[in-house]
Amino acid sequence: MSPSVELYDTTLRDGAQRADLSYTVEDRLRILHRLDAVGFPYVEGGWPGANPRDTEFFKLATKETLQHATLTAFGMTRKAGERADESAVLRELLDAGTEVICLVGKSWDLHVTEALRADLDEGVAMVRDSIVFLRAQGRRVFFDAEHFFDGYVANPRFALAVLAAAEEAGAERLVLCDTNGGMLPFDIARIVGEVRAQASATLGIHVHNDAGCAVANTLIAVDAGAHQVQGTINGYGERTGNADLIPISADLILKMGRDDALPEGAVERLTDLAHYVAEIANVTPDSHQPYAGRFAFTHKAGLHTSGVARLSAAYEHVAPEVVGNRRGVVASDLGGTATLRMKATELGVPLADDDIPGLLTSLKELESRGYTFDAADASLELLMRKAHGWTQSFFRVESYKANVEERWDEGAVAEATVKVLANGERHIETAEGHGPVGALDNALRKALTNAYPQLDDMALEDFRVRVLGEQGEQGTGSVVRVLIDTSNGEREWTTVGVSENILEASWEALVDAYTYGLLHPRETSEA
Ligand SMILES: [Zn+2]
């Protein structure tokens, strides 16, 4: 049975329009898999043809196995005066190879006459022809009616004519977009209700947050009869962002009785999902985000935790555990014993009951110093193993150093020297790199591959640095957190290091990356 409301995530497409954000292809694949694991039914991957990265992403993503999510591609209708079967944009969309295509078209008369300099009949035909063409190629089509609400206010006849054409042509969803993001909930409720009375196809809602109403507008649209909800994780998006699917999912499930919007248990993963996407996007998580922020359930000092604990319903709109968050002042982001156990099982780490208190204490301490394990599963796994009494016996670092030298002919070149003991031998290696971290990576790799040739498969994929200066969060000035993504062609892992010194933080993350790589060698060798 199909759910009572259908969530459609566009973090990878509309969310990527945010000014300070850019995803690599690997980042996108990871976010896709996480959304799939949590149970989002539709994930929009990008606009194929808009840039090489989007095209590359679809090439890889369409080969991935997904459990819950259907991957969709986004693109624009044919141009004015063009034939649909000659449209390069539609061709790229087909080439992306997804079962579902989300097609955007103009539904505000002003955009047709002024921006496209076309007449209104042609405006309608652009939508109809494009959908007919895509349907004839066997694709399912969702139609995003761009600027629908402004268009409906200006010229309801034209806006509705566009929807009718899309529906007749075979669009399964008519998604009403507040592209400018300026609508208020009252307008949204009225207009969705009026359209509902006239269109028989399933409606959707896609709103931006320019008037600060994106979440409210989405919920009221659902109440007025919209079925599909488009939005992004953490509300990422152009300008002030899109509708945030974190509070929207929680509200729909916990407060509006739409508990089939996500699979059972998914709502408990929302906090983790919000933090995970923030880490991958390298955006500082919003500590005050509804439901998922680390302070979302932290009560003002003086209003006593004891009172809250005794009578939590009097102080909290929902229990924090319901969305995978926790109450109170800084404790482990991993929450309590139950979450930690769940995580250990997920990572395949043996953890005994009496390992847990010590582990919780050290996690709490590490997090207060700026560590985060939302994305750095590999470092977390190593910590858990250590809590269970494991010590790595692969190598021991004697010393390392790195420096940068400005050369008259080559510019700045970094050089690093690493001394390690591995397999009973001492290895001293020096290597160069574009930066000091690259040089350290090269030197450590050289030193270790002598003892462990299997490390040849390993490659450092990405490297993210964040300066943690936020007052009240760290209090120590400029602590630096480094996240390193490593791959051996078979699996990928993320490690973390924190220090006031960027090289020390990077080194810590590198050592974890190599340790993890040795612990989990490739199962198949590369031919
Ligand atoms: Zn949008």
Image (cartoon, helix red, strand yellow):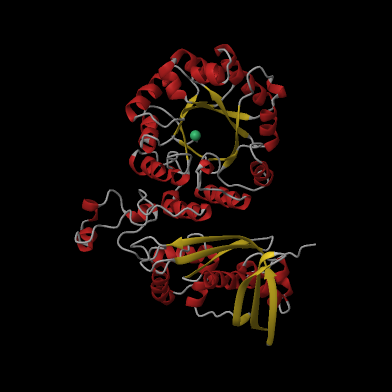
Camera-nearest residue between 263 and 404: 404
Residue 350 visible: no
Q: Nearer the viewer, residue 182 or 376?
A: 182
Residue 125 percent location from the top left of the image = 60, 16
- The quarter holding residue 484 reads bottom right
The C terminus sits in image quarter: bottom right
The quarter holding residue 248 reads top left
**Vertical order, 161 against 267 (above or below):** above
Left or right placement of residue 480 versus residue 221 in this view: right
At horizontal 72% and vertical 65% (from top left) the residue drawn is 409
Q: How many marks on residues? A: 0
Q: Is residue 66 visible?
A: yes
Q: Is 345 situated left or right of 527 in this image?
A: left
Residue 506, located in which quarter of the rendered image? bottom right
Q: Position of residue 343 (x, y in %)?
A: 48, 63
Q: Is residue 482 above or below residue 390?
A: above
- Please provide percent x and percent y for residue 344: 49, 66
- Residue at the spot 56% in from the left edge and 17% down from the top edge: 165
Name of the residue lying farthest toward the front? 408
- In the rendered image, the residue lying farthest to the right is 527
Residue 173 image offset from top left, x and y in percent: 52, 27
Residue drawn at x 55%, y 71% is 503
